[in-house]
Amino acid sequence: MKNRLKWAPLIVFILLGVALSYGLSKPNNTNITSKMIGASVPAFTLPPATPGLPGLASADLANGKPHLVNIFASWCVPCIAEAPQLKAIADAGVPVVGIAVRDRPEAVARFLSRHGNPFRAIGADDASQVQMALGSSGVPESFVVDGQGRILQQTIGPINPQDVPGVIAAVKGAR
Amino acid sequence: MIAEAGLAALWLGAALCALQLLASALAVRGQAELAAIIRPIAVAQAALTALAFSLLIWLFVRVDLSVLLVAQNDHSEKPLLYRFAATWGNHEGSMLMWVTILGVAGAAVALFERKLETRTLFATLGGQAAIALGFYAFLLFASNPFARLDPAPVEGQGLNPLLQDPGLAFHPPTLYLGYVGLSVAFSFAIGALVTRDVGPAFARAMRPWVLAAWIFLTIGITAGSYWAYYELGWGGWWFWDPVENASLMPWLAATALLHSVTVLATRDGLRAWTVMLAVVAFSMSMIGTFLVRSGILTSVHAFAVDPRRGSFLLALLFIYIGSALALFGARVGTVREGSRFDLVSREAGLVANNLLLTAILGVVLVGTLYPLILEAIGVKISIGPPYFNAAAGAPALLLVAIMAAGPLLRWRRDDFRAVLRRVAPAAIVALIALAAVKIFAPTISLLSLLGIALAAGLALASLAPLWKRNLARTPLFTWGMVVAHLGVAVSLAGMACDSSFTAEKLVAARVGETIAVGPYQVRFAAVEPTFGANWQALQATLEARRGGGDALLLQPQARAYWAPPTETSETAIHTALDGQLYTVLGKQVGDGRWQLRLWWKPFVTLIWAGGALIAIGGALALVGRLRRGRPRRQEAWI
């Protein structure tokens, strides 16, 4: 056996051991960061989800102003819990737009009349296609999108009251 | 008192183990004063671990809830078999089983190994003691199975219901026998490196031990795969889960070792490589144990996770694997180069086998650790079947092709054209199978197509060594090779058929509806509640009819256990000659319909039948080798 080669297994093992030690020393991080962060919103055009409000297209999100995109559904109970926070965010001057997933126009209208309407536009995503393209796996989820239509931040699950200032700052801080 | 007796046995075992290490070290250095006690100590030490393990089993069977481990994993309403099996269905118990098997393997070497040169044997037993000592320490300081719980609870916390299955009683022990049995090969390698005794005699001594461990590993993996298949209810038989990979990696290394040790024993070739593989095989067992037990990777096998245990195990890994590889580096220069061989020869075929097995091992290791390494630089990914199937599939198929040709090659030197003539029938069969499958199933994936074709070729080629031989006088280990290689062909055919021809139906059905899947018409006859010792369930009654035949009754259940409260699905499987009908009852969808998952899996049983053949082949070879190894007198008589 070649002289240099004989230490190779030991060196490979030590490298492996160092990698394992590093993996062990790091606390287990269960946060999942979306691949979509930093990426542009995929191209889509959604029809209005309810009479009286316009639908939503990806072009609307790249109009130079940052937005909060909220994915919700009238049949989603956590979305009801989230409604006051969305209202507060909209009242602070943040443009909030919605994507209603697998919903019916009359159900969306009833949801808005009962729980308040923070939305400037709502697109109807009947087959969850835009939702999935955005990298969202459930409702509610919210995305902070900058003026060029790039995704800056994703919140999985409802926005809680203590999260509101952070979300407002994130949208206002975006360009 | 039982728990304290168990703990005392463990401490005593650890002390004897230290003594065994000391006496062996002295004996190897030439101070033979303590040499006489090495073997008895190895046996006594094994007896103590076995005692501790038996006491833990007793605690579990009696449901002694004043013991923490029992309180956490046992339950008085659990059937006897599962109280018994619950002993190793948890971290501490399974580590005690690990140490017990380590001790018993060492004792077996001390009692039965007669071929190895005495100094090498002492070095081997010293190596075995060194490994055991670390794991004793791990048990006593980081995973005490006998810790008390005060006050004792009135009832135990049960056991993961997925584990309430006869599979648990047998799968982990066989797997561990294989896993830990490889420690013997590791210790042999250490012993031979220490005494510079790497040669054919050493290889012949080591071979039966490797074979024995490999047989258990094969059984354990095969049984585990079938267990996951029917218990999880996902219809798959291999998920490339880190824990599965942890058992596959030692198997791949042991398979390579098994073949290279033959070259060393028969032709005195591949000396350094064989020793390396012996080290790698058990290293893979230890790395696998670390990956599984430290919680560093996420897996469907949810084991208790404690980072301190992970660091402890990692330290053991560094000590054992690190020193073994350092010893290898320091000593391998003194291992003389073995005999040379031609490019076309049995040896060359076995080298190719080894390289390909090592390549697959590398693919699996990288795939298992890759998410971990990427996580270190902040990227989170998971690696699944697409990577493993593609990356391991190609070398595996190449390996099968070589496997078909290998046994038809002559040792040392062979004529290329003569080899081609010998391989030709198998190649023709493979090509015919390829054409036939392509014609009848034009949409089949490339990997499966090649799999079926190669399986057909290999099946024929694996029988070829028996051609024109007096079958009664063919040595048992030749039979072993034939059967094991045939097993690979059978298993491969099963895998390819399952992945290509499976028919799956996921439906929401009303009672009374009939669903067609594969060749079966399945009538959803009823859903009724039912119950067992510690669970209640909804049970579907399915009547499956094939052609005009009688109805088969299948009763899959959706079970709810109450300690701990868990829902599981019990599959109902009908095995026909040409495949399995696999049924799972899901949730009620509302409006009176039920989710049903039905699979028709043609020839899927071949996967495990092949696994069983491989293990049987190993057993035949082992018996053959042991017989051959008996004293001359008997051989002359035969």
Image (cartoon, coloured by chain):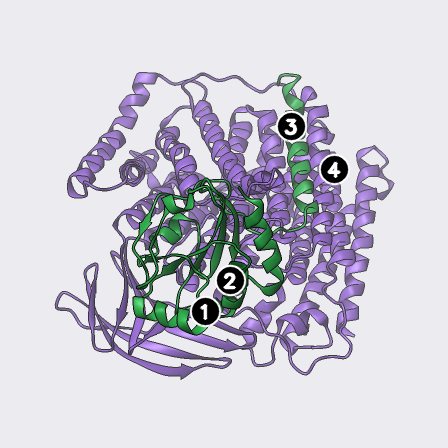
Chain colours: A green, B purple
**Foreground: B145 or B202?**
B145
**Mark 2 falls within which chain?**
A
Task: Tell me if mark 1 has few (under 14), some (14-19) or many (20+) residues whose alpha carbon lies within 10 angstroms of its own.
Answer: some
CB under 8 Å between callouts 2 and 3? no
Chain bearing tag 4 is B
Instruction: Name which residue lies at 35% across and 29% down.
Output: B405
**Mark 4 secondary-structure assignment:** helix
Question: Looking at the picture, does residue B139 appear above or below residue B513?
Answer: above
Tag 1 and tag 2, C-beta contact below 8 Å: yes
Determine the residue positioned at 59% across, 68% down: B86
Q: Quadrant of residue B11?
A: bottom right
Q: Are marks 3 and 4 on the same chain?
A: yes
Q: Nearer the viewer, residue A77 or A121?
A: A121
Q: Residues within 10 Å of mark 2 (few under 14, many from 20)?
A: many
The three-letter code of the residue at mark 3 reads: Val
Q: Which residue is mark 4?
A: B123
Mark 2 residue element: helix
Tell us which disc is closer to us: 3 or 1. 1
Label of residue B198 in the image:
3
